[in-house]
Image: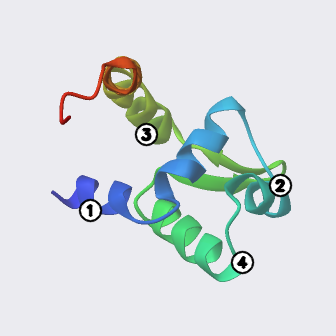
């Protein structure tokens, strides 16, 4: 539950997503996450405290644990992509169906 609480906080997953491809400076992360300085500072502090993110010469980056979490979330991402496609397909089908209310 602790992990789900952390991941459910606004901008947390976005930070982890943006850091998947490598280190980012604070400014680049701020722009990528489309958030404000205060919230980004708070979230980075939380992620650093639990060992998912660290700060080095090139900026912020995922730790080994952060990369492991990313790998663990891949099945959820795949499921979400498939679910999203099904929802879009269903919405299109509903929109194309004749209105039976009349």
The earlier-in-sequence mark between 1 and 2 is 1
Q: Please, what secondary structure does the residue beneath circle 1 have?
A: helix
Q: Nearer the viewer, mark 4 or mark 3?
A: 4
The earlier-in-sequence mark between 4 and 2 is 2
Q: Residue furthest front?
A: 102
The earlier-in-sequence mark between 2 and 3 is 2
Q: Quadrant of residue 6?
A: bottom left
Q: Distance between the residues labelled 1 and 3?
A: 17 Å
- The relative height of residue 48 versus residue 58 in the rendered view (above or below) is below
- The relative height of residue 17 versus residue 54 in the rendered view (above or below) is above
Report the side of 76 relative to 11 (left or right): left
Q: In this view of the protein, which residue sits in the foreground, 29 or 67? A: 29
The residue at 40%/19% (across/down) is 85
Q: In this view of the protein, which residue sits in the foreground, 25 or 29? A: 29
Residue 77, given in percent of the width and then of the height, sits at: 39, 26
The residue at 15%/57% (across/down) is 1
The reply to whether dot 1 and dot 3 touch (C-beta < 8 Å) is no
Residue marked by disc 3: 65
Q: Quadrant of residue 93?
A: top left
- The relative height of residue 11 versus residue 56 in the rendered view (above or below) is below
Q: How far apart are marks 4 and 3 (CA)?
A: 25 Å
Residue marked by disc 1: 5
Residue 54, given in percent of the width and then of the height, sits at: 61, 54
The residue at 72%/35% (across/down) is 22
The residue at 48%/50% (across/down) is 13
The quadrant of the image that shows the C terminus is top left
* Label ID, residue 37: 4
Q: Please, what secondary structure does the residue beneath circle 4 have?
A: helix
The earlier-in-sequence mark between 1 and 4 is 1
Residue 80, given in percent of the width and then of the height, sits at: 35, 27
For mark 2, does the 10 Å Cα neighbourhood hold few (<14), some (14 to 19), or many (20 or more) residues? some
């Amino acid at each position: 539950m602790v992990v789900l609480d952390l991941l459910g906080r606004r901008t947390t997953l976005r930070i982890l997503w943006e850091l998947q491809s490598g280190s980012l400076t604070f400014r680049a992360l701020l722009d990528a996450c489309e958030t404000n300085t205060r919230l980004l500072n708070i979230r980075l502090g939380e992620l650093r405290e639990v060992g998912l993110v660290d700060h080095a010469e090139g900026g912020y980056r995922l730790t080994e644990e952060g990369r492991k979490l990313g790998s663990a979330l891949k099945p959820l991402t795949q499921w979400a992509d498939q679910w999203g496609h099904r929802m879009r397909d269903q919405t299109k089908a509903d929109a194309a169906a004749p209105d039976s209310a009349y």
